Amino acid sequence: MEITKDDVKKIASLSKLEFTDQELEKFTKQLEDIMNMSHQLSKINTDGVKPTINVTDAVNIMREDVAEKGVDRSELMKNVPEHEDGFIKVPAIIDEGEDNE
């Protein structure tokens, strides 16, 4: 499949990308190679071949997701400098009365 510089320019424009002439030349060749490889792969007969879910023998080694009792809120509040009504008080970072002009 032939990919032209105009094809790559159009794709770049749709993607909000800008390329130099050197990059355009490079990406045109790369995209054409990718499309040709994809075309070659589509010709392979895969009848009777089971789909591959994972190409490695890796297994899930994560722990089981089990709910555990958390730390009591009053114990946590002992470690904060200031709190109110069960919430940690922090300095304001947005002043809603600030003039944005």
Image (tube, rainbow, N blue to C red):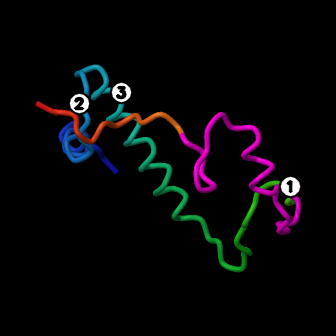
Residue 4 seen: no
Viewer-closest of 63 and 41: 63
For the residue labelled by badge 1, is the local secondary structure a helix, a strand or a loop?
loop
Q: Earlier in the sequence, mark 3 or mark 2?
A: 2
Count of all numbered marks drawn on residues in the image? 3
Residue 27 located left or right of residue 77: left
Rendered image quadrant of residue 62? bottom right
Q: Position of residue 94 (x, y in %)?
A: 34, 37
Furthest toward the bottom, the residue is 48
| Camera-nearest label, 3 or 1 | 1
Q: Kindly identify the amino acid type of the residue bearing the numbered disc 3.
A: Lys
Q: Which mark is residue 26?
A: 3
Viewer-closest of 14 and 68: 68
Q: Earlier in the sequence, mark 2 or mark 1?
A: 2
Residue 99 seen: yes
For the residue labelled by badge 3, is the local secondary structure a helix, a strand or a loop?
helix
Give the residue drawn at x 46%, y 57%: 39
Give the residue drawn at x 27%, y 29%: 24
- What is the magenta range? 61-89
Q: Which mark is residue 32?
A: none
| Camera-nearest label, 3 or 2 | 2
Rendered image quadrant of residue 57? bottom right
Find out whether the residues at labels 3 and 1 contact each other: C-beta distance under 8 Å.
Answer: no
Residue beneath disc 1: 58
- In this rendering, the answer to whether 76 lies above or below 86 is above
Q: Position of residue 81 (x, y in %)?
A: 65, 34
Disc 3: CA contacts within 10 A as few (<14), some (14-19) or many (>=20): few
Give the residue drawn at x 62%, y 71%: 45
Q: Earlier in the sequence, mark 3 or mark 1?
A: 3
Residue beneath disc 2: 18
How far apart marks 3 and 1 lie (CA) works out to 36 Å
